Image (spheres, coloured by chain):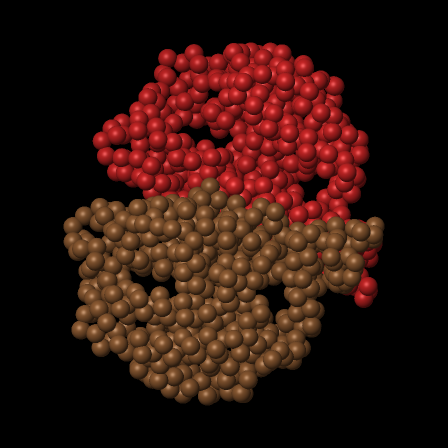
Chain colours: A red, B brown
Amino acid sequence: MAEENKTALSQFRETIHKIKSYEEALGVLYWDLRTGAPRKGMDTRSEAIGMLSGDMFKLQTSPELGEWLSALEQKGTYENLSEIDQRLVTETRKDYDRSVKIPPKLYQEYVVIAAQTENKWEEAKAENDYESFRPYLDKVISYTSQFIDLWGAKATRYDTLLDQYEPGMTVAELDHVFGGLREKLVPLAAAIAASPHQPDKSFLRQSFDKEAQKSFSLYILEQMGYDFEAGRLDESAHPFATGLNPGDVRITTRYLADDVTSALFGTIHEGGHALYEQNIMPELTGTTLSTGTSMGIHESQSRFWENVIGRSRPFWERYFGELQRRFPGQLDVSVDQFYRGNNTVQPSLIRIEADELTYNLHIIIRYEIEKLIFNSGAKAADLPEIWNDKYKEYLGIVPPTYAEGVLQDVHWSGGAFGYFPSYSLGNMYAAQFADTMERELPGMWSLVGEGNLIPIKEWLKERIYRYGKLRTPSELVSSVTGKPLDPQYLVDYLTKKYTDIYKL
Amino acid sequence: MAEENKTALSQFRETIHKIKSYEEALGVLYWDLRTGAPRKGMDTRSEAIGMLSGDMFKLQTSPELGEWLSALEQKGTYENLSEIDQRLVTETRKDYDRSVKIPPKLYQEYVVIAAQTENKWEEAKAENDYESFRPYLDKVISYTSQFIDLWGAKATRYDTLLDQYEPGMTVAELDHVFGGLREKLVPLAAAIAASPHQPDKSFLRQSFDKEAQKSFSLYILEQMGYDFEAGRLDESAHPFATGLNPGDVRITTRYLADDVTSALFGTIHEGGHALYEQNIMPELTGTTLSTGTSMGIHESQSRFWENVIGRSRPFWERYFGELQRRFPGQLDVSVDQFYRGNNTVQPSLIRIEADELTYNLHIIIRYEIEKLIFNSGAKAADLPEIWNDKYKEYLGIVPPTYAEGVLQDVHWSGGAFGYFPSYSLGNMYAAQFADTMERELPGMWSLVGEGNLIPIKEWLKERIYRYGKLRTPSELVSSVTGKPLDPQYLVDYLTKKYTDIYKL
């Protein structure tokens, strides 16, 4: 490699390392804000966060970075880079082009509008007042549209938004997979509703000691192979996981006094995110590749652990006794009753409270609405009616209020259009990965039944976790499962599971 | 003011704000490291801290900052600045000159050496091995000497080091005040040792419930007027207070299972530091003046609350019942016994375990040794003998091991020469402030006896806290007490207190 390109490479790598250090520092500040930072310090803290974010943005969009990228992309240079450097160049180029296309002034305006809209959303939801929120939402939509213009529309305008969260994902592919999913899940949900074998879950609603809940959550995390020397469990209003570096991946949960499994499944979910981030190969540490490859793949890991493993019959055959022991006299039901009680299906209005099956229908509705906004010009004024019609059609219920309908999620207020599909992609990826695992890891379900979860974690580490962003989502799915994303795995998984539970 | 100077001022202020934001972000990262950050993430975290510190240092030593300072210092400009801006210019000039005089390469070498020396110190102390530590300490001394050369010696070479922690403090002044102190305290300690009225403190050593200790610590903090919406109490191996901004001033403590007052007095001490930082005037927020004006003044506030208030008889007349209630059956002694038990004087080897009186002798010994090193060329090899001779002379005891002698403190390993005097300066300032308070706040001790501590906090806020770094230590002492620092106040306070307790 020519001397000048060696210099470009070392300066490029140094800048990447700096960007990653900023991300890590900001990660600690955000974690702190959400786990107990004192209220009165928040305004000044926000200024410090703004300053660091601004410095990081300058670094990410500096002309020098553009020049180093161009030098490293040259024919004769790129091919001689290591696999990691090649991927770093490709990923950084993508982020760079995205960022430099937005004039800083426009972006700053947008950040303010989005913050105002989030505040307004909170009020509007509390007061069930869509009308006052509508003009704010239209503004966020309009800014997002301007960004699409600046970035350039892909196959459709909405494709440009999808690609932010799930690189390479398209409307064409999602129409296909979500179409397949909807077609099978709507009748499955109907069959479940018509079943005379409805599980009882009333025993889950009692008063459960918080310390005992916490002790059980910690125990399960340890069973999953979560490394407590490389993380910690705290509490926050909204549970989250944050990977600061592979040696410091923190999770939070929220304990409900009257629900014995809410915090537990939340912890397993965040624990799944955390296992991903804790097990990325050390060669990527200090680079922007040391994180999950997409929102959808990340969500596949949280949902694999929460649903595929954590809500499985073998899991509870092993762990229900441990749970019972922590709540003496409170859980006098059979393992079967407990398992079924934690796997009920019921069409409902609120996405975040939905079961494993109908959850996907909530997502498909949002996906279809986002397409209508960016590809067909739907306005904020149109959304409540579209929302209600789709809930009627797919779930058979209509929200009595805006708060339980179109106003329930924060995502759109903050401009996160294109994010929702990740959740269902996560379910589909998880089912597809699980199918491969069942074939490649013989006796997988016996391991779960014995409480030997480590081989499962190790399999995921070798096949998925370690690569971080070194593989794109579609490369990863193909390399792990030998096939592209296919919704049939999720359909089969859900059909098999609920046919058994509801004796269909 | 000329247009160009207006620009210089606004760019100067912006840079100061940025420096302060870096300090705040770094403050959160350090707090996190010391209150539970996972072990395995520390190496990568240190790199992030190094990156931020490096960026901050670049800002603090940038040629532009030098130019803005020069512009603002010009005759005709400086006089037209606000009081705050004038002080910011003076303070920043001082830091700037200090920082730019050290070549970055030399400083980086020194940082590495100091870190190695701290590690070596930990080993050496554990193994009571001075010989292997000696060459490391000599290196730190040699770097510090080079820094004095670069900064330029003041009246004596050691004066240059003192000024870092206590701006304006000199060897001449310290020789005077420490001389006065030593002359009075050595015979007072001897009289106490000879008294037949030695208090019993055996009742303090039992097993005390940690949660009850915590609840009492929180209660006392609240009584002191610590604002929990602008702070929080955590645990760490070494208690500390950190002022991130006036709305976020955190403290930590450490609970000992077999000592009912160790964590409590530690919490009151850190609480005193915290009250200072929480009550700095909002006009200084976001500037480098929004912190305590010196180590000595800061220490005066922690020691005022811990010793003058927290170890006073009226304090326990009010609060002993509250403490007893939290430990039923464990503290069946009278208030007088409890008060005297917490105020015993006993020459001892370890500074951090020393009582209010002999503590000052520990400090004077370190001060005299530091002077010998930097003003008379003493080497690391000379220190154990000097140390032991001085302990023999001032405290009448000789350490049987290096670990209990010259190796007991971390300060020198990290190059913090000139820091120790702050602790005794704090005691002297505290006594002098208390004398003024007694005269200006009539019934001060009745307020303490009634548990009405807020007027005391408010007096300190109005006279001391609010000014942050807007006044220098000597300006502050003069403006509050009408006199320069005078050791006689501490001598009088200790004499009165122990004459009563030991019936001298």
**Residue A44: percent from left, percent from top:** 59, 44
Does A205 sit left or right of B49 as displayed?
left
Residue that appears at 72% across and 27% down: A158
Residue at 40%, 38% in the rendered image: A445
Q: Nearer the viewer, residue B254 or B67?
A: B67
Residue at 74% from the left image edge and 19% from the top image edge: A377
Nearest the camera: A29 or A466?
A: A29
Figure check: A110 above or below A397 = below
Looking at the image, residue A432 sits to the left or right of residue A373; the answer is left
Q: Residue at x 41, y 63 (%)?
A: B431
Q: Nearer the viewer, residue B320 or B39?
A: B320
Would residue B268 be visible to someone looking at this image?
yes
Q: Is residue A181 visible?
A: no
Locate residue B360: give its quadrant: bottom left
Measured from the top left, where is residue A243 in percent x and y? 54, 47
Give residue B183's position: percent from left, percent from top: 38, 79
Q: In this rendering, is residue B224 above or below B196? A: above
Residue B339 in picture, x, y percent from top left: 25, 59
Does residue A46 sit above or below B81 in this rendering?
A: above
Q: Quadrant of residue B499?
A: bottom left
Give the total number of marks visible in the rendering: 0
Q: Nearer the viewer, residue A278 or B311?
A: B311
Viewport quadrant of the N terminus of chain A: bottom right
Quadrant for the C terminus of chain A in the image: top left
